[in-house]
Image (cartoon, rainbow, N blue to C red):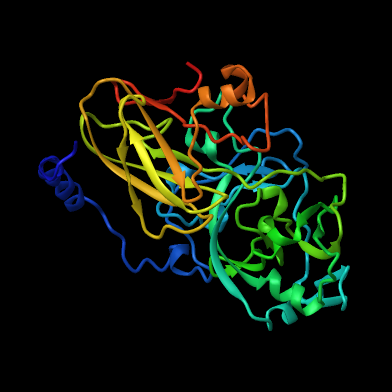
Amino acid sequence: MTTLKDRRRFLKTSAGVSLLAGATSAVKAHDTTNPLARSGYGARSQYDTAVRISDGGSNCSFASDCNTLTPLQDLVGIITPPPLHFNSAHGAFPPDINPDEFTLYIHGLVERPLKFSLAELKRLPFISRIAHIECEANYPAESDITVQHTHGKVSCSEWTGVPVSVIMEECGVKPEGTWIVCEGMDRDLHSKSIPLASAMDGILAYGQNGAPLMPHQGFPLRIMIPGAGGFSNVKWLHRIKVTDEPYLTPSERFSKPFSVKSVITYPSGGQQLDGRGYYTISGMAWSGRGAIKTVDVSTDGGNTWQPARLEEPVLDKAITRFSLPWVWDGSETVLKSRALDDAGNIQPTPEEVSEKLGASIDDVKRNRVRSQDTQWNMIFPWRVKTDGSVHVDLWT
């Protein structure tokens, strides 16, 4: 168990190195030739190199920016910067939509079919909510190295917009209206059927983290339903039809809200520990069915578990950051995390999923057998070798 003494010993032995490094650093101040000093929108430091990477998909019509992965290993806190938010565009390039010419249509089983310009939507009551979005394809492959590869199709933002419930009240949904069909303005007119009861918890979002949506995130409008899979959160939204049943559109697929999931992001695959001593294990946990209640961490391959600290805020259907002090003794070991949400869902082992589905563990790990009730959310292991290197340990 890590103690205050362990942490103070680490700080004492590292302080001299840190002070020496700071004393020899060169700092350029008031450099008016530097573009960072003249940027109207703002730019990050040249030393901040976190980027999205392609998921390797071959169905992209515009180079590698079709489906991209969030660099979870480089993030702090729970909010994902919009430029690093994962993207699943399914081959569709973001349409170039002039917000001054944009119109949202609401029709179908309603008393008053309506249309709204973006300016009119912004005159309505709005809310902001922190929530995550996870892609249905957020599972690892055997070639994966980092947590960006294995879990990079999840991100968390503060979404701002008009509650779906406000729009539905304005239109007057007829008693038989139990579903909505949302349609985007992308090349293929991606559409999704959503139970009205679930949609009423959603937002017609025009803002992300205090700014307008970026093109890849649905500018100027998308629907955001906390807990629903990314496929349901239709981007470039321009039409909502209220119906009495789901529509079997070409892009339709049905799934339940994702269950509880967690992953350690530090130390994680591709990272290097500097030697034995004190470290703070950190990771992310989330659930599409509630808020995170607890996260346990094992530093010995699952033989024993310790409760991790949940860092505030802990929110419903949003990423929660967890941490655990750890003193590494230099021996090879395996790190794991398992999360429990407030609805009673707990992360399963591969063996538990295998038994539930009646499938081999190998097929379960490779996502060859799927169920609406068992999206890929298994406990995920990282192996720390004696040289300090960290590797995926799922396939051994």
Which quarter of the picture shows residue 52?
top right
Q: Which of 138 and 337 is in front in this view?
A: 337
Q: Is residue 272 above or below residue 236?
A: above
> Looking at this view, is 109 or 322 the one in front?
109
| Residue in view at x 75 percent, y 39 percent | 60
Name the outermost residue toward the bottom. 123
Counting from the top left corner in percent of width and height, residue 36 is at 45, 63
Question: In this image, 113 relative to 373: left or right?
Answer: right
Residue found at the far front of this picture: 175
List x then y, in percent, for residue 169.
Answer: 75, 77
Residue at left offset 56%, top offset 70%: 128
Q: Residue, x 68% and y 79% (percent of image)?
A: 122
Q: In this view, does 276 lie to the left or right of 283?
A: left
How many numbered marks appear? 0
Is there any visible trace of residue 47 in the rendered image? no
Give the percent coordinates (x, y) of residue 205: 66, 67
Rendered residue at 48%/39% (across/down): 346
Quarter the N terminus occupies: top left
Residue 284 visible here: yes
Decide if residue 381 is on the left or right side of residue 189.
left
Image coordinates for residue 291, horizontal then vertical, percent? 48, 54
